[in-house]
Amino acid sequence: MSTHEASAAEVIDAIIAAAVGWRAEALATVRGVVVGADPEIVEEIKWRKPSKPEGVATWTCRGNVCMADVLKKAVRLTFPLGARLDDPTGLFNARLDGSTVRAIDVFEGVEIDEDALRRLVREAVAENRAG
């Protein structure tokens, strides 16, 4: 009998499936934009704990680029170095008071500006590559 450790992609698929409804759709859309923004982006699962055994969907490229959480009323995409990123379209709408982190809360009925998100992801990757 072989044991199968689920890949990060499989775990993220399961997180999306468990989210159901508009949150599942939003997370799937965000994921598609993030992984399509740069060919070196890797999907990982981080921060597994008893209260969140599935962990947190995280996208990396020479460091954390962003991570997603499914909340009761939003899908949150957090950028650890978000305060360094140029956000001319105002996607960041959460965690604005910190010195480094910024987040985007995607709410039901609000369409994601995929082009603006792609630019933010590419900028975050560039920040990681710059060191």
Image (cartoon, rainbow, N blue to C red):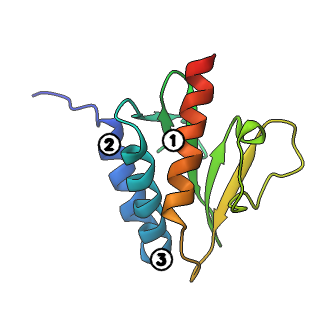
Q: Amino acid under label 1? A: Gly
Secondary structure of the residue carrying numbered label 2: helix
Crowd around label 2: few <14 · some 14–19 · many ≥20 (10 Å): some
Is residue 49 visible in the rendered structure shown here?
no
The residue at 36%/47% (across/down) is 36
Q: Quadrant of the C terminus?
A: top right
Along the line of sight, the residue nearer the viewer: 122 or 55? 122
The residue at 61%/19% (across/down) is 130
Q: Nearer the viewer, mark 1 or mark 3?
A: 3
Crowd around label 1: few <14 · some 14–19 · many ≥20 (10 Å): some
Image quadrant where residue 104 sits:
bottom right
In this view, the residue farthest toward the left is 1
Sequence-wise, which precedes: disc 1 or disc 3? 3
In this view, the residue farthest toward the bottom is 109
Asked if the residues shown at circle 3 and circle 2 are in contact, with their CB atoms under 8 angstroms apart, the answer is: no
Q: Mark 2 sits on what residue?
A: 9
- Residue 27 in the image: state x and y as whole percent: 47, 61
Above or below, 97 against 72 in this view is above
Whether residue 21 sits left or right of residue 111 in the image: it is left
Is residue 40 visible in the rendered structure shown here?
yes
Circle on res. 22:
3
Q: Mark 1 sits on what residue?
A: 55
- Residue 127 in the image: state x and y as whole percent: 63, 28
Q: Amino acid under label 2? A: Ala
Q: Amino acid under label 3? A: Trp
The residue at 35%/54% (across/down) is 14
Along the line of sight, the residue nearer the viewer: 18 or 85? 85
